[in-house]
Every structure is written in structure tokens, then in C-alpha cells.
Image (cartoon, rainbow, N blue to C red):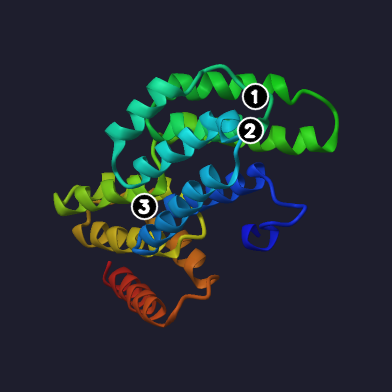
Amino acid sequence: MAQYARNSIHDSPELQLNVIRAGIDFANSLTDSRATTILAETERKLNQIEQDYEDAHYFKEQIVISKARLHNARNEEDKAKKMVENHVSLRPSISIEDNLDKVKVFHELNMREESMKLLEAIKRQIGGDTLTSQVVGKYVEQETDEREEIHFTPKRLNSMAVEFYKKNKLTPAANVLEQALQLSPKNYKLAISLLKVLIKIRRSEHHNQSQLDLAESTISRLKLLELPGSDAQVFNELSQMWERINKLH
């Protein structure tokens, strides 16, 4: 979208910023090496926007937020937090999109109080009976619920799951992977990882009914997806393994 709009009547800093934001959101939903490539391309676009627009200082805060989110996505949390604390205001702007991006950076840096306050401000900002207000209102409501319950990005949750798994803390590993899937439901790699953990829990016999149900729903979810060759093979092996374990118990 940004490529086709570039140097056309549709080109604008707002469009470029939204492409950058979408790139960071997508990278945060991934748990493999693609995230690194997407973040590098997103950083290049961010640098380009500062060169292309002479009035870039008018949207300096939005650029700072994107830079902070990039740092945080690369596990450079200290750099990101310093940028936000020094250059990002708690005061909402007139742009809902800018405010939602600000909510995201607060949430990703675990600044929950700031994130929730800004979401409340957005709710007041979109009051009205128009279809647009209702759609945005529903989105904000969903964001509020998720940010109250889940404090990290899918990428960070996956890293936490890996650490739990290495320490044989299987239930916490399953819990954080389930949260990651709630935020990124189409990420089949997260679903496969969750199924691996649940199979190990099933084998240990230290399981409960909700974990068995979660495994069944995860298998059903994966069956609906068109998995690439190697991942499809891994899933088939795991689902067969799950069936064999259940027959033994």
C-alpha cells in the first residue's frame, strides 16, 4: 500500500505511519525469524519518513512511539522505556489512531496504568451513534479487555513459554501460549507449540480437564488451517501422538 501510494496524491505521513504501525504489529505477532526481517524493513520506512517530510516535527511524538515499539520488539526494553518516559505525553491527541498506538506502547512496556487511562479517554472521544463510532467502540472494548488480562505481546509470551518449558514448568508454559494465541489466533506456530506442551502434560498425568479440552480445541483449530509442508507433517505427528496417548489412558 505504501509503495503504490508513494509520490501520489494519496501519499501522506499518516499513511506511512499506519504502514509502519502495521509492520510492528505484525512482527510482534510472529515467533520466528520473519519478525527480524519485517522489523528491519519497518525501521527503514521510519527513517525514510523523517527524510521525506519537512514538517516531520509536527508528528515527532508518533515517530518516537514507533521507534520505541521497534526497540521493544527487539528486546531493547530499557531504550524503549527511556524514550517513552522522556518524549511521550499521557495527554490524548485528537487522532484516535495516534492514541491507540500510544496505548500499544504503554501496554508493551507494561505501563498498565497509563495504558488503561488512555483507553478510557478514547472511549469518551468516540462517543456517538454513528457506525464508525460503534465499530471503533467495539474495538476499544476488546482492547481494554485484553490489556486488563494480558500484559505482554505474543512474541514476549512465546519467549516466556520457552523459558518455562526449559525449566519443566509445563502448566505456566501452556498458560502463556494460550494467552499468546488469544492475541494472535492465526499464528499456527504458537498453536503447534501449545499442542507439544499439552502432550507432555498429558503424558505426565498431572493434567486437568480444561487442559484436555484445550488440546482438543487446538487440534481442531490447526485442522482448519492450511499449514506449509514441514509444519503440516509436525502437526500430523502430534495429533497422532495425542490419539495414541488417549487410547492408553
User: Which residue position holds label 2?
Assistant: 140
Query: Label 2 sits on what residue type?
Result: Val
Which residue extends farthest front?
54
Q: Earlier in the sequence, mark 1 or mark 2?
A: 1
Query: Label 3 sits on what residue type?
Result: Gln
In space, the residues marked 2 and 3 are separated at their CA atoms by: 30 Å
User: Which residue position holds label 3?
Assistant: 211
Q: Quadrant of the N terminus?
A: bottom right
Element class at badge 1: helix
In the drawing, what numbered circle is on residue 135? none
Image coordinates for residue 211, horizontal then vertical, percent: 36, 52
What count of labels does the image hold? 3
Image coordinates for residue 151, horizontal then vertical, percent: 40, 34
Residue located at (74% from left, 57% from top): 8
Q: Nearer the viewer, mark 1 or mark 2?
A: 1
Query: Label 1 sits on what residue type?
Result: Ile
Q: Is residue 149 left or right of residue 203?
A: right
Q: Earlier in the sequence, mark 1 or mark 3?
A: 1
User: Which residue position holds label 1?
Assistant: 122
Question: Of 51 and 205, which appears nearest the observer?
Answer: 51
Question: Of 156 and 240, which appears nearest the observer?
Answer: 156
Q: Quadrant of the C terminus?
A: bottom left
Tell me the quarter of the picture where residue 144 sits. top right
Residue located at (34% from left, 29% from top): 81
Image coordinates for residue 209, horizontal then vertical, percent: 37, 51
Image coordinates for residue 93, horizontal then vertical, percent: 63, 23
Element class at badge 2: helix
